[in-house]
Amino acid sequence: DVKVTQSSRYLVKRTGEKVFLECVQDMDHENMFWYRQDPGLGLRLIYFSYDVKMKEKGDIPEGYSVSREKKERFSLILESASTNQTSMYLCASSLEFRYGYTFGSGTRLTVV
Amino acid sequence: SQKIEQNSEALNIQEGKTATLTCNYTNYSPAYLQWYRQDPGRGPVFLLLIRENEKEKRKERLKVTFDTTLKQSLFHITASQPADSATYLCALEETGGFKTIFGAGTRLFVKA
């Protein structure tokens, strides 16, 4: 069974901390994505990557950065966590759009 | 601007009835449209993809239609069961490729 694994289900961090969210996929997919999901706003794309060491900004990249050193791993970094970054973070990977996305279980991040 | 709209009000139906969910879009000309299921606290799960040249797609109790003239997709669950209770999201590939845009989803409740 193919999988996208996110390192933590729940995280609580303090304002100003640097936060790392890790995502690993075992499907050899080239495309990987980070979304955040908030009630009433749906999924919003933060960053995506279509190849190792490549990254593209999504719709809401401010306050975030990403790293993709290996094909299977895509990390999201909150440089200095703020309370408005409290959210559910979802990682996904895909071969191509027409095959659908495979999502991880999500990380619920609370910044206090 | 490009936009996807799903009914934000929850849909409540009785077990055994057909549930119909709507996805409308504007300023897109998508080649494909996807539907996902999301359970509370989990990542979305890919269900079905329909191509622009397909009017209808079926998978077990699921049926999706795609009307490119109306710019609308309908998602049907026949003989609905309480286990079908979840949020259902539609998604389109943004013109130009790479990025997928998700609707905010419609919550479905199936009562026994």
Image (cartoon, coloured by chain):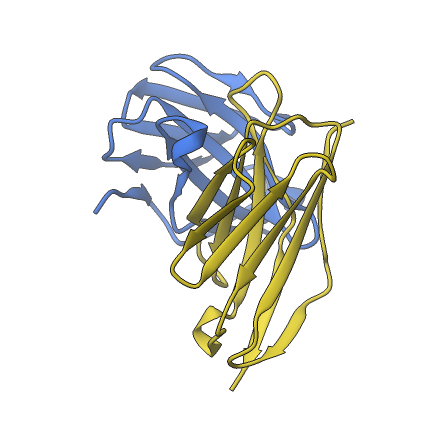
Q: In this view, does A100 lie above or below B2?
A: below
- The blue chain is A
Whether residue B106 sits left or right of residue B26 in the image: it is left
User: From this viewpoint, is residue A18 visible?
Assistant: no
Q: Residue furthest bottom?
A: B112
Q: In the figure, what tint was chain B given?
A: yellow
Q: Residue furthest right?
A: B1
Quadrant of res A95 = top left
Whether residue A102 sits left or right of residue A89 in the image: it is left
Q: In this view, does B111 lie above or below B46?
A: below
Quadrant of res B66 = top right
Comparing B31 with A86, the one in front is: B31
Q: Residue at x 39, y 51 (%)?
A: A105
What x and y, as percent, mark residue A100?
42, 37
The number of discs equals: 0
Whether residue B16 sits left or right of residue B4 in the image: it is left
User: From this viewpoint, is residue A101 visible?
Assistant: yes
Comparing B10 with B19, the one in front is: B19
What x and y, as percent, mark residue B96?
59, 16
Q: Residue at x 50, y 63 (%)?
A: B40
Q: In this view, does B16 lie above or below B64?
A: below
What x and y, as percent, mark residue A29?
30, 26
Q: Which residue is drawn at 52% across and 17% down?
A: A56
Quarter of the figure with the N terminus of chain B: top right
Q: Residue at x 48, y 34 (%)?
A: A34
